[in-house]
Image (tube, coloured by chain):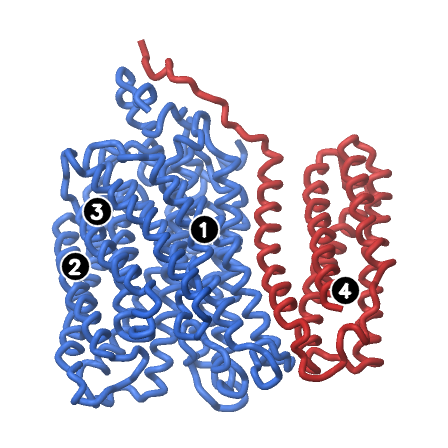
């Protein structure tokens, strides 16, 4: 009780006017999962803007052959920082931020299992992000060579060795990502423990919201895949500073080892980012179709199945290395196998929409675009899993188009959908539907202009990571179209930013349950109090709030 | 009549003690994954050193240190059990035994490293054996150090009388971590001193 009453005299008290400094202090010292979740997502969105600007500069440089807008060295730094930031400082914080905010609310808990560990996780991740960007100032080191890291987001050996990247830029990459990894592992431990031990009364595993299942899977995966990256980074540090030979081919070490270690992390990492996107969709589509999710158990099994199979597909990034036919075949087959549970999910979502009373509000619009774009992303993924096809197109713009269809066309779209869906819960105010539609249509058009055409340059043989190209290759017009999509996307994001700022001040009050939804987070006020629920509702089915609203027609007997 | 009340509500409340247990098990899972990569690297580079010294020439099997470390698992378990029963003094004593056994192991590792570096001239940069040996054994040793710090803290708290029966679950979690440190040594020992020699 003492904790509870002290919290209530804190940020909730409206009688005493509080200075900005006091409020800032509250945010800095908070251990509340909701505030930390908000800070995670906000930090992710800020880094998203930075990495987006980096991408725009690259597209400007590539808009036409022979341009000299950024020098080649800067171009290398741009794609390195863009990739690293988007994966580690945008994808991870946003996904785990949503997990932080929603998991306790959805299972009827008052906080995560280890609130202080949670705060540690956020701040260490933010520190890692700042450390990475500090390289722009401090990367010179003692040698005056390089500023920001320029080794690509997967920092292949031997390029990452001391002999080839002098100065400290690569060390900033190495240590910053190592540090963010510690924070992510801390959060993953927290989410696993919370889900396993703190579910409210009646919240059995068979009734967990799919988003919670997804976060449980993703957190367990994180525990298995992030430490190998940390281990590889420790080895790299030892190579660079103590003269070890892990990746030093001249002393018998193996550069390929780095690729194996990196992709053993790197590919499951894609699913760590993408599965929560599936979780968002699985929460949003039923509510806006006014139907229960179609095939709850198959989605759950598919989620866990994707998590398991994703641990054995990593070397499909390495077909061109020359691993030999047996390994190539194994990784090609396992990669194709993972398309099965993923395909099942698409049918689950379609089955949910089929015959439903569809409401095309902004969150649902983003989910619909996701369905189309994710299908394309998945299909090009299956194409790339065919090793001979991959030999042709590895490291081409076709690959770039493929994974941007996954991470932008699928993940980012679901993240935007999720923000429109849960913003009312977090802030107590609705986002503007009108601005939301502008955001959606501009972004969907801009995205497709940029990334559909990008497949074509790839098929025409344009390699990734080149800073310019000759005019005679037939890539000019495609690159120009690709670049022209960028301002349209940027305008869409601008509408989003304006929408958030305007709605925070003048948005329509949301009330506890603006979407007439069914999961427990909508059972409490918007925004929820620090203790989440006055009385934690008892869960009687997969749609606990439906049961509370319709006591005469509960879901339980139908499940 | 409220139809919702007809639906059975199984009691899902998990005892609070499991929070710490699941937490430490998650951490141990992550640690296994971390060690796994160093073990794989060690196995991959066995016999690939371009120059000596080679493992069979310079490595002695640390029998006594291994016996000490493995038996410290028993003493820490006895300590945790004693605290559960409320016997603080006895618990403190068993934890002290654990610290001494762990300390002996660490000293043995230090002696071995000293001998390898100064007598045999093997450093991390000498060859691939050195490159993989020091990080793997060193990673384990650093975990021993972390465990010893936590166990020593428990010992001191028991000595000053701050450790009470209510802390039994926390000490139990420290003991789980220590069991992990011991278990992973079995793997490291097998890889370095049995397979690698």
Dot 4 alpha-carbon crowd within 10 angstroms: few under 14, some 14 to 19, many 20 or more: some
Chain of the residue where label 3 is placed in the rendered structure = A
The blue-tinted chain is A
Residue occupying image coordinates x 36% and y 70%: A83
Dot 2 alpha-carbon crowd within 10 angstroms: few under 14, some 14 to 19, many 20 or more: many
Q: Are marks 3 and 1 on the same chain?
A: yes
Q: Find disc 3 in the rendering and name its residue.
A: A363
Q: Quadrant of the C terminus of chain B?
A: bottom right
Vertical placement of residue A477 versus A5, above or below: below
Q: Quadrant of the N terminus of chain B?
A: top left
B122 vs B95, nearest the viewer: B122
Query: Which labelled disc corresponds to residue A444?
Result: 2
Residue A348, given in percent of the width and then of the height, sits at 26, 40
Comparing marks 2 and 4, which lies closer to the viewer? 4
Comparing marks 4 and 1, which lies closer to the viewer? 4
The red-tinted chain is B
Q: With B140 as the anchor, is A202 left or right in this view?
A: left
Q: CA distance from mark 2 to mark 3?
A: 13 Å
Vertical placement of residue A218 versus A231, above or below: above
Q: CA distance from mark 3 to mark 1?
A: 31 Å
């Amino acid at each position: 009780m003492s904790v509870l009453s002290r919290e209530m005299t804190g940020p909730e008290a409206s009688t005493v006017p509080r200075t900005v400094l006091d409020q800032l202090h509250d945010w800095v010292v908070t251990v509340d999962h909701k505030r930390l979740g908000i800070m995670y997502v906000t930090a992710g969105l800020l880094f998203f803007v930075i990495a987006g600007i980096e991408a725009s500069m690259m597209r400007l440089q590539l808009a036409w052959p022979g341009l000299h807008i950024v020098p080649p060295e800067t171009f290398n730094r741009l794609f390195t920082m863009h990739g690293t930031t988007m994966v580690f400082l945008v994808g991870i914080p946003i996904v785990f931020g949503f997990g932080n905010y929603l998991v306790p609310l959805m299972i009827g808990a008052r906080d995560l299992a280890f609130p202080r560990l949670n705060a540690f996780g956020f701040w260490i991740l933010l520190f890692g992000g700042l450390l990475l960007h500090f390289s722009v100032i401090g990367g010179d080191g003692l040698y005056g060579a390089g500023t920001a890291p320029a080794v690509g987001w997967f920092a292949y050996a031997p390029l990452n060795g001391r002999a080839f990247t002098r100065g400290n830029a690569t060390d900033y990459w190495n240590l910053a990502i190592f540090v963010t990894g510690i924070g992510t592992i801390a959060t993953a431990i927290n989410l696993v423990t919370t889900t396993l031990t703190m579910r409210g009364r009646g919240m059995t595993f068979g009734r967990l919201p799919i988003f919670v299942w997804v976060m449980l899977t993703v957190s367990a995966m994180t525990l298995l895949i992030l430490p190998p990256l940390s281990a590889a980074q420790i080895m790299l540090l030892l190579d660079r500073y103590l003269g070890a030979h892990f990746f030093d081919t001249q002393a018998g070490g193996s550069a390929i080892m780095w690729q194996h270690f990196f992709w053993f992390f790197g590919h499951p990492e894609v699913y760590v980012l993408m599965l929560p996107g599936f979780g968002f969709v699985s929460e949003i589509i039923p509510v806006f179709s006014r139907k229960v999710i179609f095939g709850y158990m198959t989605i759950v099994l598919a989620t866990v199945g994707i998590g398991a199979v994703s641990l054995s597909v990593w070397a499909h990034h390495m077909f061109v290395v020359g691993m030999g036919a047996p390994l190539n075949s194994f990784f090609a087959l396992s990669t194709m196998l993972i398309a099965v549970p993923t395909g099942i999910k698409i049918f689950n979502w379609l089955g949910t929409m089929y015959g439903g009373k569809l409401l095309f509000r902004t969150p649902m619009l983003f989910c619909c675009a996701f369905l189309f774009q994710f299908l394309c992303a998945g299909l090009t993924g299956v194409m790339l899993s065919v090793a001979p096809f991959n030999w042709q197109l590895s490291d081409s713009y076709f690959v770039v188009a493929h994974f941007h269809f996954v991470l932008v066309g699928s993940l980012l779209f679901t993240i935007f959908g999720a923000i429109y869906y849960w913003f009312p819960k977090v802030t107590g105010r609705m986002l503007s539907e009108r601005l939301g539609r502008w955001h959606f249509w501009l972004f969907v058009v801009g995205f497709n202009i940029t990334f559909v055409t990008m497949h074509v340059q790839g098929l025409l043989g344009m390699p990734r990571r080149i800073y310019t190209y000759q005019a005679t290759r037939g890539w000019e017009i495609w690159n120009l179209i690709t670049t022209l999509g960028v301002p349209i996307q940027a305008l869409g994001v601008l509408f989003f930013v304006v929408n958030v700022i305007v709605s925070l001040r003048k948005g329509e009050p949301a009330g506890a349950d603006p979407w007439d939804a069914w999961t427990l987070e909508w059972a409490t006020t918007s925004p929820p109090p620090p203790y989440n629920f006055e009385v934690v509702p008892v869960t009687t089915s997969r749609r606990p709030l439906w049961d509370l609203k319709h006591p005469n027609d509960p879901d339980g007997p139908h499940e | 009549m409220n139809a919702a009340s007809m639906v059975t509500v199984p009691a899902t409340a998990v005892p609070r003690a499991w929070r710490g247990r699941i937490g430490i098990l998650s951490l141990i899972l992550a640690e296994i994954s971390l060690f796994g990569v160093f073990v794989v690297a060690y196995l991959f580079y066995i016999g690939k050193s371009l120059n000596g010294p080679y493992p069979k020439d310079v490595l002695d099997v640390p029998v006594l240190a291994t016996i000490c470390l493995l038996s410290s698992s028993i003493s820490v378990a006895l300590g945790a059990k004693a605290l559960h029963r409320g016997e603080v003094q006895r618990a403190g004593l068993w934890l002290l035994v654990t610290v001494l056994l762990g300390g002996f192991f660490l000293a043995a590792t230090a002696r071995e490293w000293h001998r390898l570096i100064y007598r045999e001239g093997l450093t991390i940069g000498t060859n691939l054996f050195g490159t993989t040996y020091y990080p793997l054994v060193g990673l384990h040793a650093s975990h021993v150090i972390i465990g010893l710090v936590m166990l020593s803290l428990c010992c001191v708290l028991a000595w000053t009388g701050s450790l009470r029966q209510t802390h039994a679950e926390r000490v139990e979690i420290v003991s789980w971590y220590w069991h992990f440190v011991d278990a992973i040594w079995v793997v490291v020992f097998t890889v370095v001193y049995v397979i690698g020699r």
